[in-house]
Structures are given as structure tokens and as C-alpha cells.
Amino acid sequence: MIFNSIAAGVARVVNGLGSGKRAETTLERLIQGGLVACGLLAIAVTVGIILVLIFETIEFFREVSIVDFFTQTEWTPLFIDKQYGIWPLVSGTILTSVIAISVALPFGLMAAIYLSEFAAPRTRTTVKPALELLAGVPTIVYGFFALTVVTPALQKVVPDLALFNALGPGIVMGIMIIPMISSLSEDAIYSVPVSLREAAYGLGAAKLPTIFRVVVPSAWSGIGAALTLAISRAIGETMIVAVAAGQQARIAIDPRAPIETMTSYIVNVAKGDVPTGTPEYRTIFAVGSMLFVLTLVMNLLSYRLAKRMRERGTR
Amino acid sequence: MAAPQPTPYRMPAEEANNIIKKITATDVHAWFGDNHVLKSITMDIPAKQVTAIIGPSGCGKSTFIRCVNRMHELIPNARISGSITLDGENVYRPGVDPVLLRRRVGMVFQKPNPFPSMSIRDNVLAGLKLTRRYARADAADTVENALRQAALWDEVKDKLDEPGTSLSGGQQQRLCIARTLAVAPEVVLMDEPCSALDPIATARIEDLLHVLRKDYTIVIVTHNLQQATRVSQRTAFFLTGDLVEYSDTDSLFTSPQDQRTEDYITGKFG
């Protein structure tokens, strides 16, 4: 019916028949309504997800003590002796994320500095999009890359490295988020005003001190925004760790051993045969809420840093 | 164009004998790509005086001072020919490191540009830190001396750790002057240093120039003719890349030798 009236409106406008002015306003109102509906739909879906998460999490905590959830150090909801301590999963996530960031930050930042300050304009315009293509590789591919290439290669140099471990997937995850850090940091570094570089050169500074002590610090908030967004991505990354990190929830400090992250736990439960409505089933919502809060905090931080960068840019 | 061909200005010999030449430009040409922005500039700049360069927008006056400290060549596609000597040594001679040259020839820019990531103190010390000449023991003295020379010390002495960007525009520009003086240059180039400032801040910087010229050779590019008469001992008039006239400031403004100079200073164009 909506389509019919749009078609009629279009026809009236095109033909210039009837009261053209009114047809226009009807059409405009329809389109406006449609656009509002699209916007509302996105918001409604988000709100719906949050509501389901909250509702199921509350149900979960009716059966499992919230104190245990945050104080126990074992996570065995699928075993006979059920323990619901979240920390093994959180530590698994933190471990892989830390490994990923320690790979991605130096490489991403160096790539950004190279592209912004050293590369010829042509190199910049070719390499930057090419690097961004890395972000388009499906994460399952990265997962198998970690499992079948990186981990076997690492096993030759790292003693006692298990087939499933935190190190390999962490490194691959780092490679995956390099473009995210390099691209956003490059934007931030490139947008540092020429006047600051000139001020440094005018004082007799050489190129490297100018870049590392003036330009990069001035781009700090943009780089920080890139970093927090990358951390949030690493925390939420699922496929790579589900494929290559193993399924052993333990307080993880040894990157050579199998671990389980929050995301890979959710995958394992969701694909398994846990009956719905049980506390075991609801664990995925509790873990999901935890994940949601973590990434939300990171994204908010990133948003604030990016905003600060924009404000400073216009000053 | 029916404009008369410019004749390169030569300083009368007897006048030239009385002053120490700090900078000598000989047949300097500069280009941005195909755009020929400086045409055969030949002029001497005396030591420990303020030399003003005036002229309408796009006349090449900023480009000229940027040639003196070799900042011009930082712009892609920029070229230069001719020679510029500092104390008799050609700064374009192969083997001269522009980075080292710029430690002797400091520059203050049109818009105040303190480093936003640094405190007031670190801004003053930036030149030393960036060039690895920083000595912690002398830092406090360096900061105080430079800020006193820039007439900013009393206003900021209690808040040296606040960011340089927290100051007002005029204070920021004096901070940039302090930053330039802290590396102890011999020459200070100023590229329209007051164009972004209000009249009071401008007056403070002009007062400062009178004091600074006792120790430094100053070249100031300005749009503001009154400013040139107030602060400078010598004035050069640039027009579309040519040096039209160059003499002591009083004669240039009271009895210009060139019709174009007279038209410009009497406001017929510009």
C-alpha cells in the first residue's frame, strides 16, 4: 500500500498533474516517514538486544550467586561440578587481547608514521587502501591461518607450545587489527597542522625528533582513539580464538597453553547441545553482558578521545 | 603589462661601509612549481637592526625570509637559485646542513603555534630538547631568561606547567618568541608575527622588538605599514616578486624613490 501511494505520488510529480504541490509534500512526508522508520528500526534492534541481555542475565543471577560469579576462580558450568567464576574467561580474553595489541600497536603505529611522514603521495594512496583490505579478510580465515601456519611455525621456536594456545591466535589477531590502528593513527598524524612541523624545523630540529617528539604526541588523542577501538575489537573477536585458542577455561598467564575467551565460550555453548532455559544456557547471556560492558566502555573511551581530537583540530 | 622593468636596488657604497652585513642575498630567485615568486632579489641585511619587508599579499616577502633559513625547500616542488650568505658563508653551499643553519636563524610564524602536547616550560625548552642540547641544570635559567626576553615571564612564572595552548593569542606568540630565543639564534625571522593579534598584544610585541634588536638581527615581514615605521630601521618594498626599493625606513616612507613605492605607501593599491 505504501509503495502504491509512493508510486502515485511519483507519477503525479512526474506528470505534473493534479495539485503538484500537494503531491510533493505527500511524497516528501512518505519518504521522511520511511527514513525515520529505518532509523528507529536500528535503535529498536539495539535496545532489544540490550533488553534480552539484561533480562536473561537477571534470570541467570537468580540461580547463580553474583558474588560467586565475580569471586570464584573456576569456570565449569558444563561439568558435573558446576563452578561459575567468570575470571578464567576474562583472563583468557585479556591475555589474547594484550598479545594482539602488543603486535598491532608498534606495527600499526610505525606503518602510520611511515605512510604519513615518509611515503611519497603515490605510495600513500596505494598502500593505505591495500592495508585496509586486510580488514576485509573473513576472520575464520585468520583462525585457520593461526591454527595451521602460525602455531606450527611458532612451535619450532617456542618450547612447549600447545597446538591450541593463546600466543598464535593473539599474534594473528594483532595482524588483523594492524590496519585499524594504522589507518586511524595515520589520519590523526596526517592531520597534525603543518605549522607545528614548521615550528619544530624552524627551531633547528631534524626530521626524526620532529616526528617523534612533536607530531606523534600532538596526534595522541587520535592514536588513543584508534588504540581503544582496536582493543574493543580484540576483546570481541570470536572466530580466531574459537578456532585456534582451545577450550580450556583457566586463569591464564601462560600464552603457550590452551585458554578460553569469553567469545569462544559463547560459541562453544551456542553450537552445543545445552538445553535452553537452564543456568548453563543462560551463562552465555551473563558472559555476553560482561563482554558488552567491556566493549562499550572501550568504545565510549574511543569516542571521547576522537571528539577531543576533533575539537583540538578546529581550534 | 606596461609596468616599468624593475632595476635591482643597490645600496649606496658609503652607507654600506658603515654597517656590518649579517645577511647578503645575491640574485635570489624562487619558484613554487612553475610559479616564479622571487625574481633576482639582491639585498644586504644589517646586523643588530630590525629590517622590515613590506608589500601586498603574494609579493614574495614571506618566501624571501623562508629562503634565508632554508624553510622554502621543505615545500614540495619549491626551488631556489642564487646565493644567500650568513656572515659571509653561503647557506646554499653543498655541505651546509639546513637543520644546523636553522639553529642560528630562528623563525616566528604568522599564527602562534605553541606545541599543544607541551607545557609552557617545555615549549620554551623544546628547541633545546629537540636538538639534543638540553642540560637539566641550566633549564630553569634558560626558561626564565627566554621568557623575560619575550616579556612574558611575569605573566606565566606561576603556571609554567600549564599547557602552552592555555595562554591567550598574544601570550602564545610571545611564548613562540621565547621558544625561538631559547636556542640562542643570531637572526630572528618574523613572518607577520602580529597579524593574528589584537592591537594591545601587537603593541607589546613591537615594544619587545626594540629591546631584542640590541642582541639579535631581526627581519620582520609585515602587512602593516605603520608597524614597519614603528619597529624597523630599514625597510624593503617587495612587489610581485621584485625588490622595488630598499633603504632606511624614514627615507622610504618620507621620500620614496620609486613611483610604485609611493603608490603603495600612500594607499593607492595593496
Image (spheres, grey):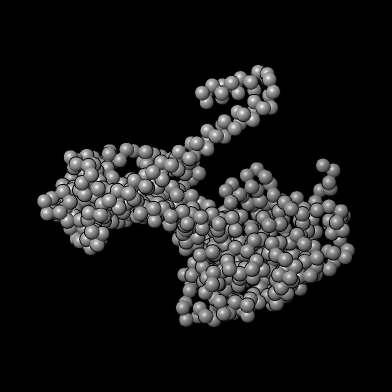
- On the image, the x and y values in percent for residue B61 come to 71, 57
* Residue B232 position in % (x across, y down): 76, 69
Q: Quadrant of residue B158?
A: bottom right
Asked if B125 appears above or below B258 in the picture, the reply is below
Task: Answer yes or no: is residue A42 visible.
Answer: yes
Q: Is residue B247 above or below residue A276?
A: below
Q: Quadrant of residue B45?
A: bottom right
Q: What x and y, as percent, mark residue B25?
A: 68, 60
Residue shown at 58%/68% (left/top)? B166
Specify the quadrant that holds the C terminus of chain A: bottom right
Give the left or right position of residue B112, taking residue B43 as reference: left
Q: Residue at x 43, y 57 (%)?
A: A301
Nearest to the observer: residue A99 or residue A120: A99
Q: As drawn, is B142 to the left or to the right of B239?
A: left
Q: Residue at x 63, y 64 (%)?
A: B112
Q: Is residue A222 visible?
A: no
Q: Position of residue A85 (x, y in %)?
A: 21, 58
From the viewer's perspective, tell me whether residue A313 is left or right of residue B136: right
